[in-house]
Image (cartoon, grey):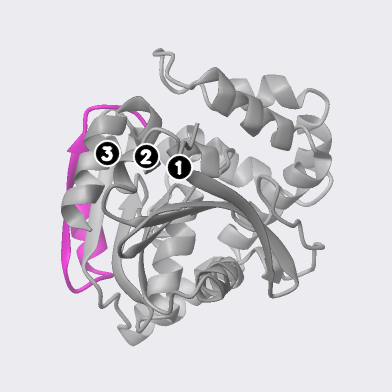
Amino acid sequence: MFKGFHLKTIKVNDVSIRLRIGGSGPPLLLLHGNPQTHVMWHLVAPELIKRFTVIATDLTGYGESSKPASSADHGAYSKRSMASDQVAIMRALGFKQFSVAGHDRGGRVAYRMALDYPDSITKLAVLDIIPTLDSFQRTNSEFGLGYYHWFFLAQPSPLPETLINQNPDWFWRWHTSRSKRKFFAATAVDDYLKCFKDPETVRAICEDYRAGVSIDCEHDLVDQNSGNKISCPVLVLWGKQGKLEQWYDTLDIWRSWATTVQGFEIDCGHYLAEEEPEQTAKALNDFF
């Protein structure tokens, strides 16, 4: 995996971030989702390095990156704080401006980055999400059952951590079994599970979701009320077999958050980069 990439760990903002970097050309940051690591890009990144300098990182709290201490406001796991860590990484690598693609939780970090650092982000791609605030504003029983983990993981400590840590291998496999197809590479799963079996990773993931239901919505609401929009071009991709296709007019929602939006579905479930890597890579290549 990741032939032609270099594995590094860089310290910024009092956290250490694991990353891989490879290729040449304009810089492109890739951000993963829950409950994964940067390894989720292992089939897409080798295509992108033909045209870009690709940096794939573990988000703060995930993988082998630092897991900051918990706090009452979950501030270290706000998407604002996680975005700040990623911007600091790119600057440490010498990139003041760059494009970013984020899947799942990484998409939430990526769009917050575009809102908070408009002079740094040249293009943004979000994979299989709508903005966090919109998700909660539109919540109904279907959402609550389909995305039950948003509410489970956000419960006060130590409830979700205690339950998950009884059998983290089982929970990870059950949580990611949204598709009947087998598409995860064994080597990728090894990395995911190695990290997920660390109780500190589970704590950090729960903190991420606690931030999502609280401080992240507060930050989004400020932008929504003020009319602050993402100014760079935005690509929206989602899985045709996933929940967004069933529940939302995904492009219409993103057009209320950004000035220039394009996008389309890919015939797969939630894990676009691993279920349909060729189509995902082409979509990102074409856009960026």
Packing grade of label 1 (10 A; few <14, some 14-19, many >=20) is few
Q: Secondary structure at mark 1?
A: loop
Q: Is residue 190 left or right of residue 261?
A: right
In the rendered image, residue 209, in percent from the top left (x then y), is placed at 62, 53
Region in magenta: 249-271
Packing grade of label 3 (10 A; few <14, some 14-19, many >=20) is many
**Does 262 lie within the magenta span?**
yes
Q: Are marks 1 and 2 in contact (CB under 8 Å)?
A: yes
> Of the residues under marks 1 and 3, which one precedes in the sequence?
1
Q: Which residue is mark 3?
A: 280
Q: Which residue is mark 2?
A: 46
In the rendered image, residue 143, in percent from the top left (x then y), is placed at 43, 40
- State the CA–CA distance, disc 3 to disc 2: 12 Å
Q: Is residue 80 left or right of residue 50?
A: right
Disc number lying in front (1 or 3):
1
Identity, as a three-letter code, of the amino acid under mark 1: Gly
